[in-house]
Amino acid sequence: MQAQDLSRYVNPFIGTSGDGHTFPGATLPFGLVQLSPETNNYSWQYSSGYRYEDSTIIGFAHTHLNGTGWMDLGDMLMLPYTGNRIKEIYRSRIDKKSEKATTGYYIVNLPDEGIKVELTATHRTGVQRYTFTKGGESHILMDFQSGLVSHADSVNTHVLDAKITVENNTVISGYTHTKNWVEKKIFFVIEFSKPFVRSEFLDEDTKRKLIVGYTTQTGEVIETRVAISSVSIEGARQNLSESKDKSFETVKTEALDVWNTYLSKITIKGSKEQKFNFYTSMYHLFIQPNNMADADGRYTGADDKVHQSANKTYYTTFSIWDTYRAAHPLYTIISPEKDRDMVYSILDHYDAVGMLPIWTLWGKENYTMIGNHAVPIIVDAYFKGLLKQEDTERAYNAIKQSLTKNSWHKYDWSLYDKYGYLPADTVTNESVSRTLESTTDDWCAAQMAKSLGKEADCRFFSKRAGYYKNLYDPSTKLMRPKKMNGEWVSPFDPIEVSPPGYGDYTEGNAWQYTWHVQHDIEGLIELMGGKQPFMLKLDTLFTLDPKVYAKTGTVFDVAGLIGQYAHGNEPSHHVAYLYNYADAPWKTQEMIPRILKTQYLNKPDGLSGNDDCGQMSAWYILSSLGFYPVNPASGIFDIGAPFFKRASVKVGDKVLTIQAKKLSSKNKYIQAIQLNGKPYHSYQINYSDIMKGGTLQFIMGKEKRSIK
């Protein structure tokens, strides 16, 4: 049975303006290639290489990041043009009215060139189709020097080495060796549908900018196919076979079919705008992590050695600090086999370098952000039965070693254990956030140790999991930096934001990080003096003046403010659900629809923050269904408020149907819940119950009440 065409509700331009940092080009679910236009190639605003408001482009590159807060990739930039125009800066005007995108397809006209450009992709190959609307001399520029970097002066220095070979008049091959966020090699083979009649390197010294030329007729079409590999040129040539003997239209149609298979994992009954937000979120969720294994299963690992994957998958682009919160728990529901393969890739990374990954790109570690949140991802998969029994010791050993070895510059475990926190006068950056996030990892390690009968380890990690209590200041009822001598750091401003590399919090402030005790909300409630004070503190969070500032550095990534709640950044993502723990579930039921309606809009600047490799999108998907994992490794999903009258979620060979009876703008409060026709008196639902399928029914009404 063919999946229904839900791609018509995907708008790849959502998030391409503002702080979303998404790209509109062609890719496949978890694909290695992301073929997309670039309007600039440096600065934080151009992390994906593209901003919707721009009216010119510099070309079409084959690798991009979805919604990240830093720059890399943008490899193999190509730009067709007509005539003999060669400028110092290569750029072309685009006709914005002609620009369109959907799943696996992008189209735009270059009016000054008289060229229509269309893009599509297979997993490892980007396919471009150029239609020349006027005859004459035409060219294709290939800029192997270009890449997405943080500063303009880095554009010409980030390439350490490159070799480009014109094999004949239809094939060009080579590699680029670059260093930016990570150091990497990308091998490529480019195949042209029409033999070029001339070729010329514009930079004879480095030979990194190549032009090939044609004489084209009006209406003539030239296609290019670019395959990439982390292993070798021959690996890229083998990957090129994915599109071999297939027309552009066939590749485009196959990409659409693959996307519809993934999009159809969940169907909803909602408004047109809701469908655009929902299915674009589904689209963004599945863009990454990226399977970087070649068609034969080979890949270059974190140790720079070539490895062989038995199932031909090795995932990279792990924005783990973001995605452990909701994206991975969501994968375990709708694509558990993919989450399992991701966990094995994480373990393979450990085997290669002796450390679980923090943030990987092109298989390499960049150590961005804090904590070691591969731990909750592994533990979550373990308790959900996604690991083979024979691999549990391997997984636990990777967790224990990563959380106890002094092998990472952001964590001195002896200091952590000596004081029960990271002292701010020794750890001068992010001391509070690093401590809090590590306690969540420790809790996860303790649960797995307990399950495996490792009692001493369980006691050790359980003690660590309580270290968050050592940074709680009863006088302010906030998490506060502390010195080695036990004194609080003064002066203390709870709304001052710490940009990366500055201050005591990570992309946040005390108000936002105080709630970062995902594994022990009950313990946090006790610290605050009980449920009533806890609830009042939450009320204050959502009603404070929504202003933040930084004494040092620049404020960014702290956006989507509702009071001091910052939905545009991940540490806040679970907070609206905490009213459930204070016996005020109606406040969660008020807040969740508000966030869904205000922080996600069907327009280019419709995301309140970076999509962060699908985490912002995962929050939307789960929260709109009616539940979200406050503790991502617990196997428990906390109930919020359903956003649709009906949704169907494919869970293996079963279906979970979610119904919201009498749902309206006024009937926004849950009056009762039924699971498979039986009364349900909890604001939490277990993963195992979700995966059994059946019917989860919410009865909605106007009354603020509890179902307990």
Image (spheres, grey):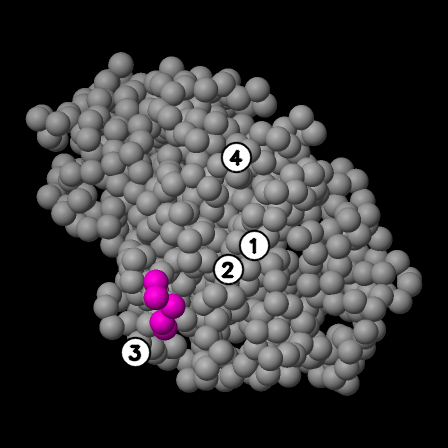
Tag of residue 491: 3
Q: What kind of element bears circle 2?
A: helix
Q: What kind of element bears circle 1?
A: helix
**Is residue 462 shown above or below 504?**
above
Which mark's residue is nearer the viewer, 3 or 2?
A: 2
- Principal secondary structure, stretch drawn in magenta: loop
* Residue to which mark 4 is pinned: 398
Q: Nearer the viewer, residue 409 or 231?
A: 409
Crowdedness near tag 3: few (<14), some (14–19) or many (≥20) residues, C-alpha within 10 Å: few
Q: Residue furthest left?
A: 205
What is the span of residues highlighted in magenta in the rendered image? 484-488
Q: In the rendered structure, which disc, 4 or 2, sits on the residue that comes first in sequence?
A: 4
Which mark's residue is nearer the viewer, 1 or 4?
A: 1
Q: In the rendered structure, which disc, 1 or 3, sits on the residue that comes first in sequence?
A: 1
Q: What kind of element bears circle 3?
A: loop
Count of numbered marks: 4
Tag of residue 467: 2
* Residue to which mark 1 is pinned: 463
**Is residue 587 shown above or below 520?**
below
Q: Residue at x 77, y 85 (%)?
A: 703
The amino acid type, in three-letter code, at marker 1 is Lys
**Does 624 appear in magenta?**
no
- In-image side of 513 versus 647 (left or right): left
Q: Are marks 3 and 2 in contact (CB under 8 Å)?
A: no
Q: Are marks 3 and 4 in contact (CB under 8 Å)?
A: no
Residue 75: horizontal and vertical position, in percent?
A: 31, 36
Which mark's residue is nearer the viewer, 1 or 3?
A: 1
Distance between the alpha carbons at the discs numbered 3 and 4: 40 Å
